[in-house]
Image (spheres, rainbow, N blue to C red):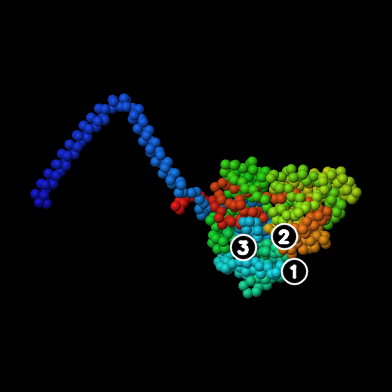
Amino acid sequence: MKPKTKKRGHKIARRWEQFSERAREESKEHIQENLISRLPNARRVRLLILEWCLLVVVIISLALTQAFWYRQSYSIQAYADGGTYIEATIGRVNSLNPLFATTDSEKVLSKLMFATLSTIDYSGHVGLGLAASIVPDETGKVWTVTLKDGLKWSDGEPITLDDVLFTVNLTKDATINTIYSSNFAGVTVERQGDALVFALPSAYADFDSTLNLPILPAHKLADVAPGQLLEHGFSSSPVTSGAFNFNAMQNVSSEGEKIVYLSANPYYYKTTPMLNSFAIHTYDSAEEIVAAVSTGEVTATAELSAEYRDQLPTDSIYEKQTSLASGVFAFLNTTSTILNNVAVRQAIQKGVNIAEIRSVLGDEYPLDYPIVTSEIKVEAYPELPAYDLVSAKDGIANAGVSGQTLHLVTISTGYFPELANQWKEQLEKLGFKVELSVYSPGQDFVVNVIRPRNYDILLYEVEFGADLDLFAYYHSSQATSTGLNLSNYANALVDDLILSSRSTMSMTARAAKYETFLKRWVTDVPAIGIYQTSLVYYFNKNARSFSENDRLVYATDRFVDVEYWAVNRTTKNRTP
C-alpha cells in the first residue's frame, strides 16, 4: 500500500472517532437535560401522560381488532379432505357379501362398499345409481336398463352388464336364499346390445325400486357354485364398487366384536370421498355404544334410540332424528294352531292395550296401518276396534284357546325387548300363557325363526320402500320360507288388490285399492301396527354427516351423500 493512501486512511479513522465521541457526549447531555432532569416534573402532568398512554393502547387495540375482523370476514371454517370416520353398529359381521347382509352391521357395510342399479335419492324417491337409464314400455311389463360409462370395480376392472346379469340370475338361484330372491320371481332378463331387458310376469309400476340391488363382480364369482358363495373368500375380502373399499378386519374380542376398516374408493362412480377411510366398529349392546360415543372412541352411531339421549354429552354430541318408511308390527302367524282362527286374532286385536304398549317408546310415531302417509294418502282409513278386555277374554274363551301357550318372538335390539315384555303382560291378561324368546339379529335368526315361521307372534320391523308395495308382506305367494309374508296370510281378494295396485300407474286409483285392502287387513288381523320407526343419529359435533334435508326411506340411506362426509376442519379464505 502507498504511504500517501495509508496516511489518508488514518486521518479518516481519527475523524470518525472524534465524531463518535462528540455524538456520545451530546446524547448524554440531551438525555440529562430533557429527560432525567425533568422527571420530577412528571408528577404534575401524570394524568396527561396516563391519558396519552391509554389513547395509544386504544389505537393499537382498534388496529388489531380491525385486522382480525378483516381477516375473519374473508375466511370461513370449512371441511377438508382426509381423516377417518368411525361408526358404531350392533350385530355381528358374518359375511361381507351384500346378498347375505342381515344384521345392521352387514347392511351398513353393504351400503358403503357396493353400488346399486337404482338408488334412493335425497328426496326419498327412486333415482339412478349405476344405471344410466331405467325405462318401462307402455305396458309396464318390460323394462330396459343401460349402464353409465366408465364404471369400475375397486380392482380397476370395468363394471359391465355381465355383472348385472350374473347378480340377477344369482338371486333367482334356488340353492341360495337372499333378501332379494323374491324380487325377481318370474322375471326373465336378457342382454340386448348395450342394454338389459327385464320381462315381468305382470305389470309393475315401481319395478325400478326393485333394482336397488347391490351388484357382484362376475369376473370374481362367475365360477363359484351358488351354494358355496357364502363360504367363498369374497365374503371376507370383497372387490367393491361403492364409496369405500375393503381394507382389513380386526377381531376385538372373542364375543364377535370387530372393527372393519375401509378406504376411499378412487373409482367410485360419483366422486372420490373426502374421507380417507371409514371404519365400522361392531358392539354387542347399546350400553357399550353409549360409552364409546361419550369417550370419542367412535364418531357416530345410528343404533341408539332417543331414550339414550340424556346419557350422552351434549357439549360434544349432536343429534339428528328423521322418520323412515318402515314400521314395527306384531305379526300373527295365521297358520299356527292357535291363531289360525280369525276370531282369536280379532280378540287379541281388541284385548291388547296398544296405547299402554306404546308408552315405552320415545319420540316414535304411532303406526296403526301398514301404510305411511309420506308414500300414499288414503281418503278414509277403516276404524280399528276399541280396547275391550272383557269382550276379548270372552272371545278367547269361546274359541277354546284360553290357557294355551303362545310363542312370542322378537330380537334383542332397540325397543324390541321392552315391547315384547309389554306384549307378554297384555297376552297373559287375556288368559294365554306366553313363552317369550329374544334372539340376536342375524343369519341364524333368519334361518331358524323367520324362514320356518317358528313363532305364533313375531315383533319385527319391515321396510315399505320408496314406493309402497305390500306384495312382499301380504301376498299369499310370499308365504314361503323365502318370502316375507311373515303372517302366512292368504286372502284371494287381497291378492287381487295387491297385484292390481302394482300395475296401476295412477296414484289416486292405487290409493282407492289400498283403501279396500286396509278394510280386509283390519278384519283379518294378520298383523297389528305398533309404531313407525325413525333414525336417531348421534355424532360428534366436529364431524359432518348426512344433510338434515335428506328424506330417508331406509336407515342406510343416510349414506346417500357419504362422499361429502368429513371430520377435518380448516380455515379457508373466501374469494372476493
**Discs 2/1, front:** 2
Instruction: Note whether residue 497 is visible.
Output: yes
Element at label 2: helix
Q: CA distance from mark 2 to mark 3?
A: 25 Å
Q: Is residue 438 left or right of residue 95?
A: right
Asked if residue 187 shows in the view, the reply is no
Which residue position is annotated with label 1? 201
Q: Compared with residue 140, is residue 316 higher up or lower down, i.e. above or below?
A: above
Q: Between 4 and 390, which is closer to the camera in this rendering?
A: 390
Q: Is the C-beta separation of discs 3 and 1 under 8 Å?
A: no
The residue under label 3 is 129
Which residue is depicted at the point 16% across and 42% down? 16
For label 1, the crowd category at 10 Å Cα-Cα, with few meaning under 14, some 14 to 19 and many 20 or more, is few
- Residue at 10% x, 51% y is 2
Task: Look at label 1 and name its amino acid.
Answer: Pro
Between circles 2 and 3, the one closer to the viewer is 2
Query: How far across and down, in percent of the image, does residue 553 sit?
Result: 67, 55
Left-right relation of 156 to 341 = left
